[in-house]
């Protein structure tokens, strides 16, 4: 299963060449990732993902320029790997006509009070497994 996030484009996202700046795409990915992680505990009493997380790695392939328009782009997000103390998510930024970007991010849950990474909880792993892509499941990407 994939998480879908509708991301509006802002005029200030454009660079001097008239397309979305490469650094802005990182903010778009962050918006989609936060939306994805926040859905686990929207008022249900869960504390999952609320303690914080840090990005350990981004990998981005820019496929074509995205120019300003009023229609949002869709960011599809899924989980590609779950380990004891991190997760890797994949993304595609696209619309019905084009694929603009593919990316992955390694996210580490973090305990800011203790100032150190922490392990994923059982609840977090259960949630993430719902979004684990089929190819990752067959390769044993779940720890």
Image (spheres, helix red, strand yellow):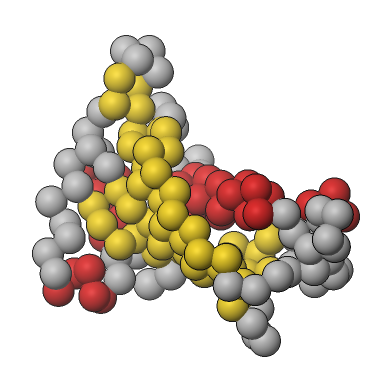
- Pinpoint residue 37: horizontal percent, then vertical percent: 45, 47
Q: Is residue 35 visible?
A: no
As rendered, which of 35 and 82 lies closer to the eye? 82
Q: In which quadrant will I find the N terminus? A: bottom left
Q: Please, is residue 135 above or below residue 23 in the view?
A: below
The residue that appears at 66% across and 64% down in the rendered structure is 6
The residue that appears at 37% across and 38% down in the rendered structure is 56
In this figure, what is the number of numbered marks? 0
Report whether 57 appears left or right of 22. Answer: left
- Pinpoint residue 12: horizontal percent, then vertical percent: 85, 49
Q: Is residue 59 visible?
A: yes
The residue that appears at 41% across and 33% down in the rendered structure is 53
Q: Please, is residue 95 above or below residue 118 in the view?
A: below
- Pinpoint residue 122: horizontal percent, then vertical percent: 20, 43
As rendered, which of 78 and 22 lies closer to the eye? 22
The residue that appears at 57% across and 66% down in the rendered structure is 62
As rendered, which of 83 and 65 lies closer to the eye? 65
Q: Please, is residue 67 above or below residue 98 in the view?
A: above
Report whether 31 appears left or right of 110. Answer: right
- The outermost residue toward the front is 17
């Amino acid at each position: 299963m994939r998480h879908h996030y509708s991301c509006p484009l802002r005029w200030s996202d454009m660079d001097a060449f008239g397309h979305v700046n490469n650094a802005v795409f990182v903010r778009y990915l962050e918006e989609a990732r936060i939306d994805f992680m926040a859905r686990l505990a929207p008022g249900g009493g869960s504390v999952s993902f609320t303690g914080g997380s840090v990005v350990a790695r981004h990998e981005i392939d820019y496929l074509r320029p995205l120019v300003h328009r009023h229609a949002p782009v869709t960011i599809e997000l899924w989980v590609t790997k779950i380990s004891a103390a991190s997760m890797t998510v994949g993304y595609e930024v696209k619309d019905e006509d084009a694929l603009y970007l593919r990316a992955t991010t390694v996210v580490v849950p973090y305990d800011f009070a203790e100032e150190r990474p922490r392990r994923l909880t059982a609840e977090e792993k259960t949630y993430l497994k719902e979004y684990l892509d089929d190819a990752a499941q067959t390769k044993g990407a779940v720890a």
